[in-house]
Image (cartoon, helix red, strand yellow):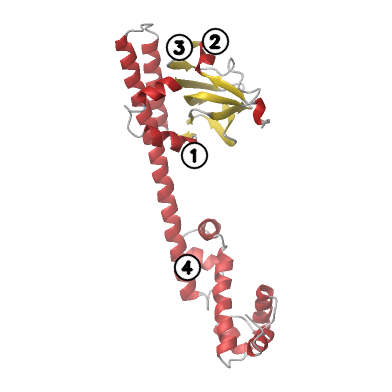
Amino acid sequence: MKDAKTIQQVDFSIFSHMKDINMYPNRIALFESLSELGFEEEPNRIHAAALAICIDGKCEVEIDLKHYELIRGYAVVIVPNQIIQFRQISADFRLVCLAVSEELISDLTYKVENLTQFILTAKENSLLMLNEQENARLINSYMFLKSKLECEKTTIFQKRMLEHLLIAIFYECYEFFQQKIKQTESTSNRKEELFNAFIKLVIDNHRLEHSPAYYANRLAVTPKYLSAVTEAVSGKSVKRWIDEYIILDAKVYLTSSDKTIQQIADELNFPDASFFGKYFKRILKISPKEYRNNKISGLAE
């Protein structure tokens, strides 16, 4: 992104210069093309809010330095003062976009419950992934709002009606964000449950079972998925957790018993003392015998 000094400040008046647009002056703008905005050329700080829904094709968009890919069934919510730049717009890209002025947002702040929370949520992650039904709902709401704007009336009744239609669209979007948050939390909880089940299995079985595949099979998941979950939850790999429990037992045997290296290898289900010795040294950079001698001498950890 360019230096901050080159960021263009864009307010709601930019939409009044567009030809193919439906507007309620200083309040609402509906349009279906990005070509007149010029947002591909440089980053722009937007002093307005917008909902852009992809109808077809693909477009890459950067919002506050976060990169999103906008494809069919996806939408982005842009809130005031975010920096936006569209990139690599495909030839078949089509969208519908609803823009709302800061003035209207200010007017709605005390009329709409959770508006502030919605703005904070959208700032954190602008992308909405919609299923077919959700996508159709939002597009239908957009088209209905568009039909009311095309009436070309600016009475107080139309103003109130448009505000209520906007509030309805806001609640639709907020519902989709909340569902997304719940799904993320649910996924996170399932991952933590799987990780906890894995650790319990390791505690109970590490002396006999050293293979990640064994634990994945017991948990009815693939080794790749178990590894991904374990890394995500703990920052450590499946193999590292297994190794840590094996090494802990090995240290205890070496320092608190008179078992031979071969006996310890047998206890921990290694083929022989040599195999166990190589395994131990690979992890601790010291042989089992040296570790025991250093411990006795007070040199080992």
Q: CA distance from mark 3 to mark 4?
A: 59 Å
Helix, strand or loop at disc 2?
helix
Q: Is residue 232 above or below residue 78?
A: below
Please name which of the two marks, 3 or 2, marks the residue nearer to the observer: 2
Specify the amino acid type for callout 1. Glu
On the image, numbered disc 3 is attached to which residue?
22
Single out the residue that lies furthest toward the bottom.
258
Q: CA distance from mark 1 to mark 4?
A: 32 Å
On the image, numbered disc 2 is attached to which residue?
17
Specify the amino acid type for callout 2. His
Q: Position of residue 118 (x, y in %)?
A: 41, 35
Helix, strand or loop at disc 4?
helix
Quadrant where the C terminus is found in the figure: bottom right
- Label 2 packing within 10 angstroms: few (<14), some (14-19), many (20+): few
On the image, numbered disc 4 is attached to which residue?
199
- Left or right: 3 as drawn, with respect to 200: right
Quadrant where the N terminus is found in the figure: top right
